[in-house]
Amino acid sequence: MNEYNMYVGMDLGDSMNNVCVLDNAGDILWECQVRCTQEGLTAMFDSMAPARVAIEASTHSPWVSRLLSELGHEVLVGNPRKLRMIYRNARKCDAHDAQMLARICRMDPALLCPIQHRGRQAQVDMTVLKSRNALVETRTRLVNHVRSLVKSVGERLPSCQAEAFHRKMGAFIPEDLKSALLPMLEILKKVTEKILAYDKAIAELSVQRYPECEVLQSIQGIGPITSLAYVLTIEDPTRFEKSRDVGAYLGLVPRLDQSGNMDPQLRITKTGCAYLRRLLVSAAQYILGPFAQDSKLRKWGLELCARGGKNGKKRAVVAVARKLCVLMHRLWMDGTFWEPFPEQCQEGVT
């Protein structure tokens, strides 16, 4: 027996949302459009009896799901990658999408593969990390732009860290290009200063608001940026029954396509937060690199590299990243600091 008397499917748009409301029997009560604003949604859903509402993950879905939950409704945020019946519909339109969402949430909500959005504070704090990442990407594009233009006239700029590019490269730019490229170095200087300001803000944020980051930063290769991104993405570590589930949540496990006796090796799923996944892979590369201290995790990763095979080093890096996210969850849950060789630590205690 269904829990609610009304089931709502809402296809979110940038300005208008298409809404379809079903009764307990599956008949359409009404269809309409509502403005994608807090005022418009409140006016419609505040007077409505408690209902189950299905929406798809999108730019607006975080604040919409929070608003409707506060108004007393159960909100399910569907994973668009799993709703093939919607995005592959031969007669796809917003009204049909809303009706399909309503029917799915009435019959079997599990088909939505619902996701959990961050809380508002976590979302706000995540904007600091994303803004820094946008500036880093901008700086990389500008550095590549300057290098490519110098290379196009037959010259080359020496190797240099991106942080020092604006200070060191001015003397190496050809005279006839200085009028065009020196202003770029001024912009790079300002961008680098802003990135350093973000680094300071992230370090302070991880200490003041998220003390669990200190435990995660005890792992080699994990700094304030990666630890804070991990905490803000996972948010509640208790929602995972096993630490191993975090690897699948972040898309670091291989895809499966089994059929009969066929079980090919496939790439990782790449679901979840791409930004955090990239940070974990970078940390894994450091752990396997020449400057990392010796540890059980490093030895395990180097053994995978030594086995060779197709893309042996890349596969080892992904495997270490997966182990890393599982280890971080375990330390977070236990509140214990990382030990490079836990067996030796236990022997010392005994």
Image (tube, rainbow, N blue to C red):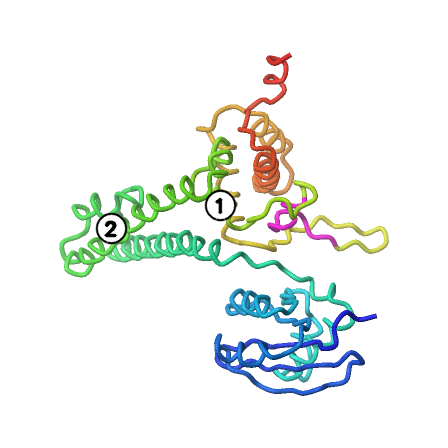
Within the image, what quadrant is residue 245 found in? Answer: top right
Residue 182 in the figure: left or right of residue 318:
left
Query: Residue drawn 65% across and 72% down?
Result: 53
Mark closer to the chain start, 1 or 2: 2
**Residue 280 vertical position relative to residue 55 in the rendered view, above or below:** above
Identify residue type, mark 1. Leu
- The quarter in which the C terminus is drawn is top right
The amino acid on which the numbered mark 2 sits, given as a three-letter code, is Glu
Mark 1 secondary-structure assignment: helix
Q: Image quarter for residue 46?
A: bottom right
| Residue found at the far right of this picture | 260
* Drawn side of residue 110 relative to residue 223, left or right: right
Tell me if mark 2 has few (under 14), some (14-19) or many (20+) residues whose alpha carbon lies within 10 angstroms of its own.
some
Q: Which residue has dot 1 on it?
A: 279
Mark identifier at residue 187: none
Question: Which residue carries the number 2 mark?
Answer: 155
Q: Residues within 10 Å of mark 1 (few under 14, many from 20)?
A: many
Q: Nearer the viewer, mark 1 or mark 2?
A: 1
For the magenta stretch, what is the residue range? 245-256
For the N terminus, the image quarter is bottom right
Q: Measuring from the top left, give residue 52's x and y in whole percent.
A: 68, 71
Instruction: Quote the CA–CA distance across marks 1 and 2.
Output: 34 Å
Q: Is residue 205 left or right of residue 323?
A: left
Q: Secondary structure at mark 2?
A: loop
Residue 14: give x, y in percent of width and height: 49, 77
Q: Nearer the viewer, residue 127 or 40?
A: 40
Q: Is residue 246 in the magenta section?
A: yes
| Image location of residue 199, percent across then percent down | 35, 45
Position of 278 relative to 305 (above/below): below
